[in-house]
Structure formats: C-alpha cells, structure tokens
Amino acid sequence: MTAVDVNISPDHRIGPPALPRLLGPDPTLATHLARYGPLTRQSSMLIDAVRAAGLTGRGGARFPTADKLAAVLHAPSPRVVVGNGTEGEPLSAKDKTLLVRSPHLVLDGLEIAARIVGARHRILCVERGNPAVHAALATALAERGDRHTDVVFTPRRYITGQETALVDFINRGPGRPTGERPYERGVDRRPTLVDNVETLAHLALIARFGPSWFRSVGTPMSPGSLLVTVAGAVQDPGVFELPGGASLDGLLHGVGARRPRAVLLGGYYGQWISAEAAAVTALSAEGTHDHGTSLGCGVVAVVDHDSCAVAEFTRVIRWFAASSAGQCGACAWGLRDIVSATEALQAGRSVPEAASDIARWASRIRGRGACRLPDGAIDFLESGLRVFAPEIDEHRRGRCTRPDRRLLSTPRPEPWA
Amino acid sequence: MSATTRLILDPIACDGHGICAELLPEVITLDEWGFPMLAASDIPDELLPAVRRAVTNCPTLALRLTRWEDERR
C-alpha cells in the first residue's frame, strides 16, 4: 500500500487515508456528509478523472468505466442512467450490503454519472424481496429530498440483471436480453448508461477526492478498493472491502477457511481454481488473469473436502440452464444437453462419452447467444472439470461418499410471467 | 477504400428453421440442435446473390447484411 498522494488537484479534497472507503459506520446522511463532505459542483474534467483513476466496472465484466461514460455521452440526448443493484448472482451480497450501509454513496454516484453524461432520468434497480435494502433506499431518498431517482424492483432472476435484460424490464418487457447496446438504444429507446452500484459508489468518491487518492490503494492495474463476498466453507462468511491486489491466501485465513479444496472466483460467472493455486493468487485483474480467471463480481466461494463438489457443480449447471432466457437455440438446447452430460458424470455413467460431449458442445455454444450466460456456464463447468478431475474419477468408480452440503446456493429463478 | 459485406445472425430472432443452411451451405451449417453456425461473417462478392436469397427467405428475418467501408489507415 502506497502513502497517500499529497499532490491534490485544486478540484479535490483530501480523502480517507485507509480502508474502509465504501463501508461507513452508519447509513445516515449526516454521517455520510461528515465522513466524505458534500458533493460539489464538479469540473467538466470529471470523465478524465475517472479514466485517470482506472475505475473498472464492479458488476462482473470489469469494463473501463470511463469508456462506458464516453459512449453514452457521445450518443444523442436525452440520456438515461441506471444503477444496477439487482445482484442476481446467488453467492454475492456486496451490492445489497453497500445499499444498506452506504446508500448515499450509491445515490451520489448515480447523480455524478447523470451529471457526466447529461442525463435527467435516474433509475436505481434492486431485486424484490429485500426489505432491508428497500427500507435503506427509501430512508436515504427521503433524507436527500430526492424525487428524481426512480427505484425499480426487479424479479428474482439472474438473467434480468444482465444490462440489456435490465433495460428490457425497465421498458416493461419481461426482462430478457435484447442484444441492443444500451448506450445506443436503452430505456425508452434512449442512450442509457448501466453501472453496478459499487462502481457508482467509487465514482462518488473519485468525484470528491480525485484519481490519485483512488490509486493510493491497490495496484497500478487494479487500483482502488473492491468489495468481495466470501461464501461457502468458511467460519466468517460475509462482505469485505479489500485493496486491489490483496492476497487471497490472507483472506482465506482471515475468514477461517479450514481445509479448502478449491475456490470459485467471481461467482457462477467465474471459474474454479484449486486451493494450491488460490494460495498464490492476488485479488487483482492481473493476479487472477495469471490463473485464467477474473475477479468478476467479487465472489470468493470456498468448498472443502466435506461436501461433494461434483454434486454442487452439477446443481449449479442445472441452475444455469434454468436461468436461461430460452431465446437462443444454442443456449436453450445446448445447456439442456450439457446438464444431462454433467448428471451422467455425477452418476458415473459413460464418463468418457459425457466428458467428450461436453467439450464438443462447449465449443459449439460459446459466443452464439445474445448474452454471455451460456459462455459463463461453460467456463464455470470446464474449470470445475479440470479442478475436480479426481472427484469425477471417484464418481466414475462409484466411490464418492460425500453429501451435497449445498455450500453453493442455487435458488430457483422466478417463473416468467 | 474497399467495402466488405457482413452477414449477421440474430440469435434471438432465429428459430432454427434451417432454410438458410440449405440455400447457403458454403457459409452456413446447422449445429446438432438445428441452429445455424456461420463459417465466416465476411461475404465474398460472388456469394452475394445466394446470401441475399438466404436473408430474404428466413421466416423470422434473423439474418441481415451490412456493408462496411474499410478505411485504409
């Protein structure tokens, strides 16, 4: 961790010197203002500040935020900004936690994003059925006297959090991916910015304290802090704010991971790595890339030797197939067949054929959907087949005695209306 | 400047009728589920008439052609 940069530009104030940055002591407006100060009328250089800060999206894709802002800014007005707090990834809790503990940072970020792209319409999306989140938002909006931010409640479906599907739902559609880029044609067919709520929270702080402050923690390629959700076979699961580049091994020890067998990085949209690889992985873009994965949405899920990993990932593949919007043939039919083959592996039936079927179908399915759900399913499964090869062999020989402890939760998606 | 014609498939609109693969086997084959896979998206000029037939005969209008002007830098 580098020392705080004292070369503060005239536009920026001195920010908090250490972590936590995003998660404050209480969610009230008074504490928010005492801790961070007010949002000032920012200079028109703000998009450059975001670029200099190197902020990337925290929703999973980790796309450069400045590029997204520029794309919407250069599209015709009127424009819309959407904060995505739906967090449909079942293992992830960071967005809900952020909304409950620091709603004002998210709402500030949404205002800043709207200011940058010149949007009048601000929308914040959260899933139904989260009373703590809804209450925190209602209170925060009332504290700010904000009548311009619309809160949209989405169904509990992973796919509806995908940005084109979210736009579809806001447009009173069912919430299925559309293949239309939001920055071209989004809410009410207007150019729309869709950003994860954690990304917006970071934006709110960069607007106040500047890119040098943002980069005072983290690594050059993974600057700033990030929220991770730790789940699975650990003593202290939960949401933690870490500097970019933090040691995964240090995190696992800190949360009491007893005898980890493997770690799922990035949630179901991410990939498996063995415990041995996890021991030398840094939680950064470059560190995870070295192991063929990415940070994704910041989920770190641990499985140990007590649960049947094969049962767990088979259940997740079934969940992926159930989560498909069913619009694209390769995804709808391909994932169905991949589920059957994965179940064959679990049952120890025709293992070589099932494995080669999966490999062939995987290469057929990639990139042929309107969204990346099928690609995510395949990356998840193929990394699992590599990491859990010994367990799959145990199943082939009928030798697995572990139960499915449901370390990985797979809630049924809400049915389509 | 030269122009490229690109064939684009909309996977949402596509229902797997398969007419395109019959009309344009040089470019389109069907996967095991009956859905089209494009061998390439850039279309050479001599295939344009056949490609246009495939585009207009798709029952769900899932195929479209676009022309790109390549700017030489």
Image (spheres, coloured by chain):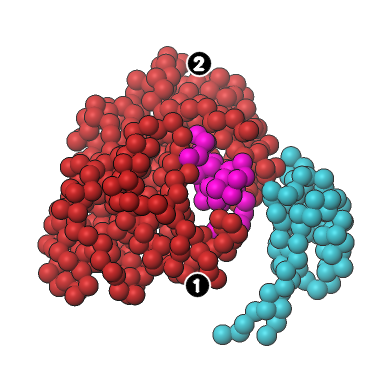
Quadrant assignment for the N terminus of chain A: bottom left
Residue annotated with mark 1: A74
Identity, as a three-letter code, of the amino acid under mark 2: Gly
User: What's the residue at 34%, 47% (across, down)?
Assistant: A141
The correct choice, above or below, for A208 with respect to A141 in the image is below
The correct choice, above or below, for A350 with respect to A76 in the image is above
Q: CA distance from mark 2 to mark 1?
A: 60 Å
Q: Is residue A172 magenta?
A: yes
First to last magenta residue range: A153-182
Q: Residues within 10 Å of mark 2 (few under 14, many from 20)?
A: few
**Disc 2, SS:** loop
Q: Position of residue A267 (x, y in %)?
A: 41, 39
Q: Quadrant of residue A388?
A: top left
The subunit letter for the residue under badge 2 reads A
User: Position of A343 compared to B59: left or right?
Assistant: left
User: Position of A203 compared to A333: left or right?
Assistant: left
Q: Is residue A229 magenta?
A: no
Q: Earlier in the sequence, mark 2 or mark 1?
A: 1
Q: Position of residue A240 (x, y in %)?
A: 25, 41
Q: Position of residue A114 (x, y in %)?
A: 41, 62
Residue annotated with mark 2: A398
A355 or A254, which is in the foreground? Answer: A254
